[in-house]
Every structure is written in structure tokens, then in C-alpha cells.
Image (spheres, grey):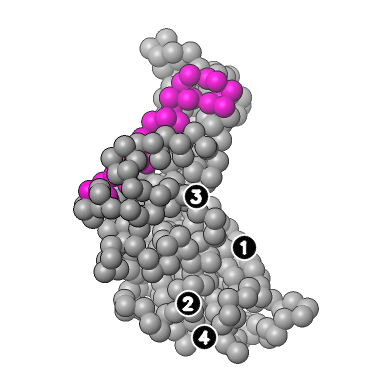
Amino acid sequence: MGYFLGIDGGATRTTAWVADARGRVVGRGRAGPSNPVKAGYAAVQREILRAAQAAIRPRRGTPWRAPTIVNRQPTIGNRLEAVVAGLSGADHPTVHRDILGWLRRAIPARRHLLTTDAALVLEAALGEAPGIIVISGTGSIAFGRDLRGHVLRAGGWGIPYDDFGSGYDLGRRAIIAALQDYDQRGPHTVLTERLRRHFRLKSIPRIVVRAPAQHEVAALFPLVLEAARQGDPVARQLCHAAGEDLARLAVTLVRRLGWRRRKFPVVCAGGVFKASATIRRVFARQLRAYAPGTSVRLLRREPVEGALDLARRLPSLRVPPDHSWV
């Protein structure tokens, strides 16, 4: 029996699962972030191998054989039919070529596919069916697949130029609101004091000197959601704006696909959607005002399951396995 390795590498963590041909998961592994653009190739290779080696570690009751490290090199040898990896930043041509070449050397298998982490979400959400997915995590992006299998994209052009409605965007807007509150340019918000305590600052203007990194700003979104649930008007407005921005992504794809009068699924994915019923509600209301036939639901599967689905049907994919297709 052959086995399949799926890898989901994002800005926060790397997840690897091994499954058999029936889809039964026989191993799981996790490691640190593996965005090749932000973390660099060495870190990406290290974290992918950590996650993959943990996933293929033999467990009692499974037929999986022990991994092999060849000549102490970071190489995994085993009975793999296919490896599918989805990484943030893998749509860059040079990154795709370099990482795919390394992946073939490091993890031997009959077939390899390197695509983006967003493509895994698309697969986990829709399989081969037409529809739209909107992802809001650290960043935000949307994809629509038409009846012929062609994929369209909206958003996701990166921080600081895009990614509206994302965790980073919520954190950035919270900092702006706190600074405006301090200046008395904007309304008072509990976010000012909560951000000051979060970063252990003497006063909120010190956040400019502190200059939080992108991942630190993105990690602020739970503070915004909590303040909104407790009734803070500014935080509630930020959540409302995020829902509208994310709906705009979906509406853009509906218009480009010509689906305004059709019935089709829209799947919401990512940590922001999962954490906020308010954002989901605003998103669905705005989207249905434009396209009443939409069926909106939250993604219940893991992106790495999309990688395994792709791996099992890799021979029949309509795209060349050497190319990123989203």
C-alpha cells in the first residue's frame, strides 16, 4: 500500500500529515513557520523536515516503516507515492523552482507538487467543485473556481499594501485607533490601555519606538475581538469594517465570474473568521446583498487535508505537477 505526505506551510506553523490510499491518517507532525520569502530557505527546509519526520515516525499499530536519514543528510526515505506541499510565497517563480528542487531531493516520492498554502484551503473547502473561498488569517485573500476549473484570485497582495480584513489589518487599525484616542483625534477606546499593557509600554505613543513586527501586529486581533464582544464601540467598528472588506473580496470574484444570479458556495477560512461570529455575520450580510444565491459556510477541514486530497489525485490533475497553480 502506498502512502501520501501532505504539508501545509504558513506564516505561523508547518503541519505535515501522512495518509494511506484510503485517506486514513497514520502520522502527524508540526513545526515552526515556513514562509520562504520571510523566513529564508534554510529555515523553510529545517521546519518542513521537522514536521515531515514527526509525521512519518513509526507508531504502534501502523504499517509505516521507520524513516531513513541518508548519510546524515536531511533526506527522508520511505514508501511515498506523492508529496504535496503548500507554502506561503510559493507562487514566486524563483522560490517555486528552488523549493521544489530541494523537496524532490529531500523527500523522495513518485510525484511532487508545490503550490501555495491558499491552494490547499481551496482544495479542502471545495475539492474540484466550483465556488469561492475567502481566507482571513495573518493576511487575507480570496479565490474563485469557475465551472471549467479555472481559478481567479482577488487580494492577498501583501502587507502593507493589501490584506484588508486580516488579523494584521485588525491589529494595525487597533494601533491607529489607540494613537488617535491618545491625541483626542478619535473616540476613546479600551484598546488604548490594553495595547499599552500588552506591549508593556509607559504610554501608548511608545509603540512607535517599539515598532512591533508584522506577526506581533497580527497577533493583536484577539484583543480587538474581545473588546468588541465587551461592547467597545471602536473595536466593534473595526470588526464591522473587517467583515465589509472581506465581503468586498468575494463580491469582486462574484462579479468577475458572472455569478450574481447563480447559486454557489462561499467558504470562509482562517483564524479571523473562526474567531469572530460578528465578522462572519457582516461578511455574509454584505455578500448576500449583492448575490442572494450564495451559501456561506465556515471551513471545517484542515488545509493539510487539502494537501492529502491533492496528493491522492495528483496523477489526474489538469495542471502540470511542476507548477504552482494558485
Q: How far is disc 2 from disc 4 in space, using C-alphas? A: 8 Å
Placement of the N terminus among the 4 image quadrants: bottom right
Q: Would you call the spot at circle 4 few (<14 residues within 10 Å), some (14-19), or many (20 or more)?
A: many
Q: Which residues are magenta?
A: 227-255
In the rendered image, residue 133 lying in the magenta stretch gets the answer no
> Is 17 positioned to the left or the right of 102 in the image?
right
- The answer to whether the residue labelled 4 contacts the one labelled 3, judged by CB atoms less than 8 Å apart, is no
Q: Position of residue 187 (x, y in %)?
A: 44, 13
- Checking the image for residue 81, the label placed there is 4
The residue that label 3 is drawn on is: 298
Q: How far is disc 1 from disc 4 in space, using C-alphas? A: 21 Å
- Secondary structure, mark 3, is strand
Q: Residue at point 43% right, 67% down? A: 127
How many dots with numbers? Answer: 4
The tag earlier along the polypeptide, 2 or 1, is 1
Q: Quadrant of residue 91?
A: bottom left
The residue that label 1 is drawn on is: 30
Q: How far is disc 4 from disc 3 in space, using C-alphas? A: 31 Å
Q: Residue at point 64% right, 68% down? A: 28
Q: Main secondary structure of the magenta part?
A: helix
- Checking the image for residue 311, the label placed there is 2
- The answer to whether the residue labelled 2 contacts the one labelled 4, judged by CB atoms less than 8 Å apart, is yes
Is 244 above or below relative to 104?
A: above
Placement of the C terminus among the 4 image quadrants: bottom left
The tag earlier along the polypeptide, 1 or 4, is 1
Under mark 2, the amino acid is: Ala
